[in-house]
Amino acid sequence: MSGTQTASQRLKEIYDKRKAEDAEIDRLKKEAEAEDLETVKALIKLHGFTQTKLRGVFKAKATKSSGTRKSTAKKKSS
């Protein structure tokens, strides 16, 4: 049995490999994000984009209110 592994040993080996790969994926995601942000900054500078020009690219987070708010509380009659 010198060349064979038990199921537990093989499973541990696979988990360790997976953990290392997950760490590599996280590192590469962060690097790619930083590179992409630099690209965006360069394009903004090149074309002179302003916040107003880019407003339609981003989704608005706040909802517009109708202005006046109507009370739903019932009035007491005397």
Image (cartoon, rainbow, N blue to C red):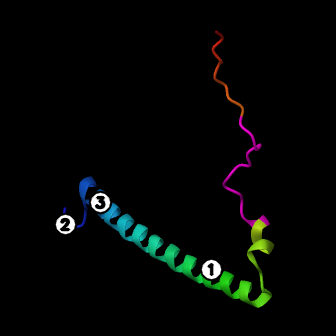
Disc tally is 3
In the rendered view of the protein, which quadrant contains the C terminus?
A: top right
Residue range highlighted in magenta:
56-69
Q: Nearer the viewer, mark 2 or mark 3?
A: 3
Give the mark nearest the N terminus, 2 or 3.
2
Is residue 67 magenta-colored? yes
- Element carrying mark 2: loop
Which residue is under mark 3? 10
Q: Residue furthest left?
A: 2
Residue at 71% across, 57% down: 60
Which residue is under mark 1? 36
Q: Nearer the viewer, residue 63 or 1?
A: 63
Q: Quadrant of residue 47?
A: bottom right
Q: Nearer the viewer, residue 4 or 17?
A: 17
Q: Is residue 2 left or right of residue 78?
A: left
Residue at 63% across, 23% down: 73
Q: Is residue 50 left or right of residue 8?
A: right
Which residue is under mark 2? 2
